Image: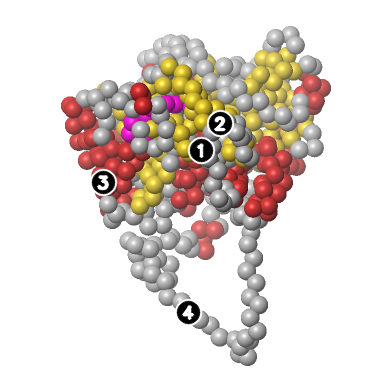
Amino acid sequence: MAILQAPPDLKSKGLSRDAVYVIDISGSMQGIKLDAAKRALAKSLRGLRSDDRFLLIAFDTGLLRYRDDFQVATWLNVKKALWWISNLQVRGGTEMLPAIQIALMGETPAARLRTVLFITDGQASNEDELVATVAKRRKRARFFCLGIDTAVNSALLQKLSRVGGGTCELTGPQGNIEALVSKIEERFGHPLIDDVIVEGGELGAEGGKALFKGRPVTVLLKGSPELIQCRGQAGERTISMETRPAKVPFSLGPLWAKRRIASLQDRQIIRPFERERLRPVITKMALEHSLLSLYTAFVAVDESSEVLKTPHSVIQPVEAPELWSQGSGSGSFYQPRVEDAKLTRDGACIGTPYYLAPEQVQGLKIDQRTDIFCLGLSFYTILTGRRGFDAKNTVGLFRAIINEKLKSPRKVNSAIPKIVSNVILKMTYKKPKHRFQNCEEVLKALHKLPFDWGHPPQSCSEIRSQRDPVNVGNDPIRELIGVTVFDCVIESFYDRDGYCWIFEAKHVSGKRYFIDVMAKGGQVDRMRQRMAAAVGLTSKMEEAHVMRVLALAESAAHFFILRDYMAGETLQDRTRSWVTPQIDESLIYLHQALLGLSEAHKSGLLHGQISPAHMLVSKTGFLKLTDFKF
């Protein structure tokens, strides 16, 4: 073990900070938890230096931002930000991913260090996706977590901090928040050296570290190296150090192994294609050092000879967690009634829940009017900046989709033209017979608006490649299009049918493609049948606004799906960067989506799950519909 301190000449200097604060304002933060989170945020904000900058983000199912860009931490700017914080109120459900993506977006200047303080109770369902996002997008940023709850999701927050190169602190909502934040600020409030790399042995935890004024870097290395070499960056200056480790009279092996196992288990989440390769490594290490892991456990054996002749029960009273309701039996947990379980039929409901049609939720037959509803609900969100239906859980959301009346878009955003508002409402009527019956009817209604439908929208940014190669074997693709080069992974995510990687691929002729490599899950036959149908229907289509599926191949473990290529970003990512909805630009996208959907329907193809994430927009504003399911 080595403890690294900064050279004396750096202690009065240090790097300026780009401090990002992310606060959870979802319904689970109701009451004194939100008050505690706001006090923590205010305390940390007051601790910034005059050359630091800050960015404030609040999230529930949507996002609130104090400003779009970093603000210099002047006295006046901090005072204005504190007023904004004091007015935060709890709102809907919890979606951490967009907030994390915004917090890590963009580049940080070399002379500065970005620190992210994530304040939440940690309640989320997509934990692996959150951990992978922090690990892949953080670049030089340091991700710190502050969990506020009596039953905080500490496992998630510790993983986020670990892969984010930061630390995690936990407290109850009635704890001494100011003292805890002061402790946190002492530990990462004054960065000195970034990207500290240690060489001389096998590290317990992977990745470069940051050295702060109040928190030296502690590293564990396997073996007994005679000399440890360290280097890091203090702005534009490269710092190099050497040290000789001192021996201790006890073994540090279990401590090193514990950190190493945690690091490898995090790597399994970030790179799931390595899961099976790392499993025996983790198991062996855990058994050697008698440690818990995903694949090992302790077994308690009672060897006492006392045996009771008659069975009996022992009731052990346990206090309910602080602030939980003391209702009869179920506490504060919602328990659905029997009819909730019958809301959908197995396999009938697919897609993003917020953009489903009532007939999908109920498991009824779908047709082209279902796609029109989903498209209308997607553009309701884009035009108004809020979802049409929302709830704290999926059951509540499905009830809202079936029963609640959609509020007029024009009442939410008065800038929306009346014709457009009426079109969106008719696209999203509950009963299919009351909606537009086809896309041509929607286009005809839209064209009553005096608008230049050929007007190009603002340019979009290209997809940022992560340059993270994956060895899944590409022989089936070679058989499809000849010699193929995997340039990089564009995106990786969990799909209903398994884990999927999207590659940018290049033919020997120079023509580019997208290749989806999908790990086979439990729905192999359904996936094969679905994609084969998509190949047959889209490969011959000449509609420019539909991304064609050109071919399908498979190996023992993966499906390989060959698609058209277009550099761009999803409409979800495009609109997420807007401060206010861009009406004209949104109408151009709606028009293109309807043109593509109309031709798809004429070819007998249904989409089945249209959402802003299933529309790709190029740099010039050209839109393509992707991921047809039927």
> Can residue 320 be spotted in the picture?
yes
- The residue sitting at the top extreme is 509
Between disc 1 and disc 4, the foreground one is 1
Q: Specify the label residue 287 is tagged with.
A: none
Residue contact between numbered discs 2 and 4, judged by CB atoms under 8 Å? no
Q: Look at label 3 and name its amino acid.
A: Glu
Query: How far across and how far down the image is residue 214, in percent?
Result: 35, 37
Residue underneath mark 4: 315
Q: Identify which residue, 371 or 318, lies in the foreground.
A: 318
The picture quadrant where one finds residue 584 is: top left
Between disc 4 and disc 3, the foreground one is 3
Residue contact between numbered discs 1 and 2, judged by CB atoms under 8 Å? yes
Magenta segment: 188-195
Callout 3 secondary element: helix
Residue underneath mark 2: 228
Callout 2 secondary element: strand
Residue underneath mark 3: 178
Q: Look at label 2 and name its amino acid.
A: Ile
Residue underneath mark 1: 2
Q: Residues within 10 Å of mark 2 (few under 14, many from 20)?
A: some
Disc 3 versus disc 2: distance between alpha carbons? 38 Å
Q: Residue at x 57, y 31 (%)?
A: 227
Q: Look at label 4 and name its amino acid.
A: Ile
Sequence-wise, the earlier of marks 1 and 4 is 1
Query: How far across and how far down the image is residue 309, in percent?
Result: 63, 90
* Above or below for 326 versus 454: below
Q: Identify which residue, 65 or 428, lies in the foreground.
A: 65
Query: How far across and how far down the image is residue 581, in percent?
Result: 36, 25
